[in-house]
Image (cartoon, coloured by chain):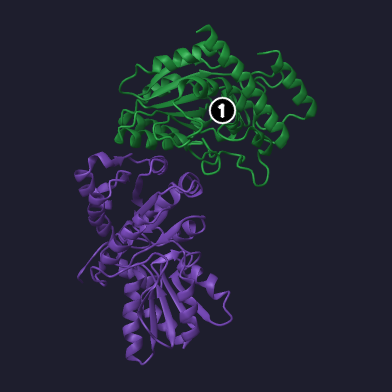
């Protein structure tokens, strides 16, 4: 277990470096929410999900929907590092002709299971996939990463009630609870109240974890496997901009790229581990 | 009048199609009875999803099912199918190139008594603006069944609009239809009337009156608005040089505008558009509404005479 955790922690550092490199190179993008998602995305792709990078369309694969699509550097990074496409493509993010659009395009990027970017839509797509997989007797699961700000969208709760009605225990929503949205802190823009209580009230089984403690993330993933007749919400308590001291918990790092000096400083920090 | 609503054609044909095609799913939004999908839901409960009054979610669920190779049909009223769930269909289905069908009843003024909240008069324009979308309105029961079969056989998102109220039977069972190819119902030389959906029936009445007065009319059922049948429009234009479009929709951005896009590129031709003149409808009997808003056969006749 110790080695497993240590290995994943190292992978998460690689992910963060790749995230910052591609956003810096692009000159625009969303570092804050990409960094807050880096640890659970690492755990999913390197440990939890049944996937085959050489066969992105594998019928039995677990699906991942990045409903908070603006955080796509985290997804592109893990796909590049896992070998879904040539790593050097990360330098083309947001550039003309690139497969790496500003938000994920399932028809351009091998390994992207759903096009996303308009907040609030991904969980419904996950519900459709989960219903279809059950119909096909396919044991694959569907993971949907949601921003905490994103769950202000009403469609999320429409999807939540449908998932509960159809007892979709093959659907797992991960709420990236970093407390920050575009315009500021969620508590100031639109307070979310008792997030765990809301999901429970909608009929979901809620597991809370420290979204940056790899051991706790693995514990949450392990616990979700025992849930029989409910969709699972993993409430991952995270820090926006996690891993880079001057980005951590600073709302202005939601959607700007680091300049040359900031980038160098961030990479230097990451080399020392987080 | 002997006839049937095209929403009934949807409810009837989808049971037949589902028997042969296991990929078909229907997603209802609490108006299954009105959408005539109850038969489907009883025969294929495992392929029927009712998300309740939650149209945006219905669109997303359909997109998710389509990623697995299913053929999901979102079933609701045209007002909700074109506006409440618009962005979900635009981004999660059309941009994502997923095989989602949006089949909607209550097109135009056909939910006559329900009033403006339920009369979709913008949907053609909305959906024909979105890349990758196909937009269709069948005229009657049999053509609706045939076009639904074509839409299911086609890979890609389709928006199809049905009538709430009954329309006269016109086509026979077995009449072939091709998406994107208008049907010439009658050849003529003096002018062309291009209609679709319920307005084909008003056009037929107008043609009978005009023909009795020795005006030779070419009549086209342009069931597919997008892709519009450019070749047929140019062909009829070269013959008659005059086109009147007739649609149960705002005159802005619907069938008339789609035809005008082609006429604008032609060196010859003039045209007039008949439809709802950029205003909301109201509650009332269907034919009274058509008359009040200058969309019925008598309006077609008078515009035709002005054009000759």
Query: Is residue B123 in view from this perspective?
Result: no
- Give how far across and how far down residue B125 sits, in percent: 48, 60
Please give the name of the residue rendered at 38% of the width and 37% of the height, measured from the top-left corner: A128
Chain letter matching colour green: A
Query: Is residue B177 in view from this perspective?
Result: yes
Please give the name of the residue rendered at 62% of the width and 40% of the height, measured from the top-left corner: A102
Using a 10 Å C-alpha cutoff, classify the residue at mark 1 as few (fewer than 14 neighbours), some (14 to 19) or many (20 or more).
some
Q: Quadrant of residue B117?
A: bottom left
Q: Colour of chain B?
A: purple
To which chain does the residue with label 1 belong? A
Please give the name of the residue rendered at 31% of the width and 20% of the height, measured from the top-left corner: A228
Report the residue marked by disc 1: A82
- Judge by depth and name the residue closer to the eye, B72 or B275: B72
Q: Classify residue B71 as left or right of residue A151.
A: left
- Give how far across and how far down residue B245 sits, in percent: 44, 74
Q: Quadrant of residue A15?
A: top right
Position of the C terminus of chain A by quadrant: top right
- Give how far across and how far down residue A153 sits, in percent: 49, 34
Which residue is at the far bottom?
A: B214
Q: Is residue B249 above or below residue A205?
A: below
Disc tally is: 1
Q: Classify residue A92 as left or right of residue B181.
A: right
- Judge by depth and name the residue closer to the eye, B268 or A16: A16
Which residue is at the far right?
A: A261
Q: Secondary structure at mark 1?
A: helix
Q: Classify residue B18 as left or right of residue B246.
A: left
- Give how far across and how far down residue B214 sits, in percent: 36, 92
Which residue is at the far front?
A: A54
């Amino acid at each position: 277990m110790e080695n497993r955790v240590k290995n994943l922690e190292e992978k998460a550092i690689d992910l963060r470096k790749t995230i910052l490199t591609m956003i810096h190179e692009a000159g625009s993008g969303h570092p804050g929410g990409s960094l807050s998602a880096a640890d659970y995305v690492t755990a999913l792709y390197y440990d939890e999900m049944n996937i085959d990078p050489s066969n992105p369309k594998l019928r039995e694969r677990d699906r991942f929907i990045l409903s908070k699509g603006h955080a796509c550097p985290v997804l592109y990074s893990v796909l590049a590092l896992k070998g879904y496409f040539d790593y050097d493509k990360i330098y083309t993010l947001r550039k003309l002709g690139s497969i790496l659009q500003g938000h994920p395009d399932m028809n351009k990027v091998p390994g992207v299971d759903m096009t996303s970017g308009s907040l609030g839509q991904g969980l419904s797509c996950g519900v459709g996939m989960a219903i279809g997989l059950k119909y096909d007797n396919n044991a694959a699961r569907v993971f949907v990463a949601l921003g905490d700000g994103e769950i202000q969208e009403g469609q999320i709760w429409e999807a939540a009630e449908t998932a509960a009605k159809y007892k979709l225990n093959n659907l797992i929503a991960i709420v990236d609870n970093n407390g920050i949205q575009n315009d500021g802190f969620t508590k100031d823009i639109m307070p979310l109240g008792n997030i765990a209580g809301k999901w429970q009230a909608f009929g979901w089984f809620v597991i809370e974890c420290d979204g940056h403690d790899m051991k706790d993330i693995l514990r949450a993933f392990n616990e979700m496997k025992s849930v029989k007749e409910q969709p699972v919400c993993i409430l991952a308590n995270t820090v926006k901009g996690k891993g880079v001291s001057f980005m951590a918990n600073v709302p202005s790092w939601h959607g700007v790229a680091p300049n040359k000096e900031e980038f160098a400083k961030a990479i230097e920090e990451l080399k020392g581990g987080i | 009048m002997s006839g049937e609503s095209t929403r009934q054609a949807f409810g009837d044909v989808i049971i037949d199609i589902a028997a042969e095609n296991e990929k078909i799913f229907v997603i209802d939004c609490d108006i299954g009875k009105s959408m005539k999908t109850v038969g489907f839901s009883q025969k294929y409960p495992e392929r029927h999803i009712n998300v309740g009054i939650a149209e945006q979610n219905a669109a997303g669920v359909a997109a998710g099912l389509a990623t697995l190779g299913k053929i999901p049909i979102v079933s609701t009223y045209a007002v909700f199918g074109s506006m409440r769930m618009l962005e979900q269909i635009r981004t999660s289905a059309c941009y994502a190139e997923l095989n989602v069908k949006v089949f909607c009843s209550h097109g135009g003024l056909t939910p006559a008594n329900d009033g403006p909240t339920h009369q979709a008069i913008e949907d053609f324009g909305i959906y024909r603006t979105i890349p990758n979308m196909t937009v269709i309105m069948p005229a009657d029961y049999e053509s609706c069944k045939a076009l639904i079969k074509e839409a299911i056989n086609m890979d890609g998102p389709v928006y199809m609009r049905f009538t709430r109220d009954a329309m006269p039977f016109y086509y026979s069972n077995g009449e072939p239809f091709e998406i994107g190819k208008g049907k010439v119902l009658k050849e003529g030389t003096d002018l062309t009337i291009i209609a679709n959906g319920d307005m084909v029936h008003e056009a037929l009445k107008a043609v009978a009156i005009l023909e009795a007065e020795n005006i030779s009319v070419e009549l086209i059922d342009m069931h597919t608005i997008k892709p519009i049948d450019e070749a047929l429009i140019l062909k009829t234009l070269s013959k008659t040089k005059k086109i009147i479009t007739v649609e149960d929709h705002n005159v802005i951005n619907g069938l008339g505008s789609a035809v005008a896009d082609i006429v604008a590129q032609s060196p010859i031709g003039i045209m007039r558009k008949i439809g709802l003149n950029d205003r909301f409808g109201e509650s009332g009997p269907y034919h009274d509404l058509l008359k009040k808003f200058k969309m019925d056969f008598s309006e077609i006749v008078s515009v035709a005479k002005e054009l000759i």
